[in-house]
Image (cartoon, rainbow, N blue to C red):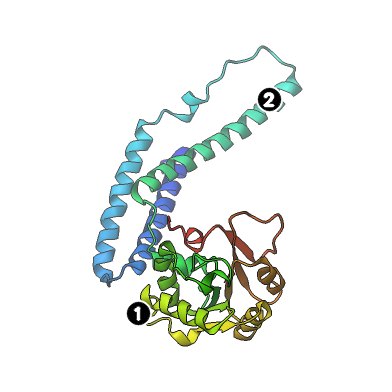
Amino acid sequence: MAALTSPAADSGRDELVDLIQRFVESLAEVCERLPFHVHREKLRSITTLAALAIAIIFAWKLSRSPSNHQRRQRKQPGPLPARANASLHANMIVQSSEASTSSGDLGVQDVADEFIPPVKLTLGQLVRQRLCEGRKVTCRLLGVILEETSPEEIQKHATVRSSVLEVLLEIAKHCDLYLMERILDDESEERVLSTLKDAGVFTSGGLVTDKVLFCSTENGCSSFVRQLEPDWHIDSNPEIIFPLARFIKYELYISPSRPERTASNVFTSTSLEQFFGVSA
């Protein structure tokens, strides 16, 4: 006569199979992100060993945990009427089943967290992820790339924010990036271009001086954005950001304070680097 397996054993086996499948999928995803090629046969051997190790640890954890029956023992109440007693019994069965499922899920998650640590993404991966794989980006200079916040200031000086440089270069590497700004005279244009060049913005090859656009009005900046049709526009001027929200897929509003109301496709951050999780 064939031996009968208990529901608890079936549940434990199902959880183990699910855990191994999740581990293999996570390992494959990690390998795809590695900067070097991993041979499939070697990956299969490593996966097999890792799955075996998880199975052993999982079985050991289950063997050490007290039985569900012992953990859920309750003090029995006094005699109840037949109908009330039946109802209480049914509720206890449902609660016990829910608690068992929850406990099992937590146990699987604990083992998964132990063997599958969170993958730390590179800055390039973060940029692509946060930009939703957007390929074209337009960005204002004042208050985002430059320390200065008005055209009058860059008539005297222009300074690239050092904390934003790494993120800017990474965006230029993965996206078709255009920078733009409103200026009051030709000297301001020369000053900004010289400052960007000295900061090394044009050394990565992703950004050239022809992609730095200048105009004399705010409407000119809006026109640049409309004509370029980017996937993302980044700006520190709310008078530019919010009217453009109807035409641009995504926008990032750089502001020290969060506005009360924004469009669903407008994100807000205190700085460009903060949006990508880079500390200043």
For the point 41% across and 71% down, which residue is it?
170
Quarter that holds the N terminus: top left
Q: Where residue 87 sits in the image (x, y, percent)?
A: 71, 27
For the point 42% across and 61% down, which residue is it?
163
Q: Does residue 79 sit above or below 206 in this rendering?
A: above
Q: Nearest the camera: 31 or 104? A: 31
Q: Quadrant of residue 85?
A: top right
Quarter that holds the C terminus: bottom left
Q: Along the polypeptide, which appears first: circle 1 or circle 2? A: 2
Q: Where residue 118 sits in the image (x, y, percent)?
A: 39, 53
Within-10-Å neighbours for mark 1: few <14, some 14–19, many 20+: few
Q: Nearest the camera: 47 or 8? A: 47
Q: Is residue 145 left or right of residue 27?
A: right
Within-10-Å neighbours for mark 2: few <14, some 14–19, many 20+: few
For the point 56% across and 77% down, which residue is it?
181
Q: Where residue 162 sits in the image (x, y, percent)?
A: 40, 64
Please count the marks in the image. 2
For the point 32% across and 48% down, which residue is it?
54
Q: Is residue 138 left or right of residue 81?
A: left
Q: Which residue is mark 2?
A: 88
Decide: marks 1, 2 in contact (CB < 8 A)? no
Q: Where residue 99 sits in the image (x, y, percent)?
A: 55, 34
Q: Which residue is mark 1?
A: 203
Q: CA distance from mark 1 to mark 2?
A: 74 Å
Q: Secondary structure at mark 1?
A: loop
Q: Nearest the camera: 93 or 199? A: 199
Q: Secondary structure at mark 2?
A: helix
Q: Quadrant of residue 268?
A: bottom right
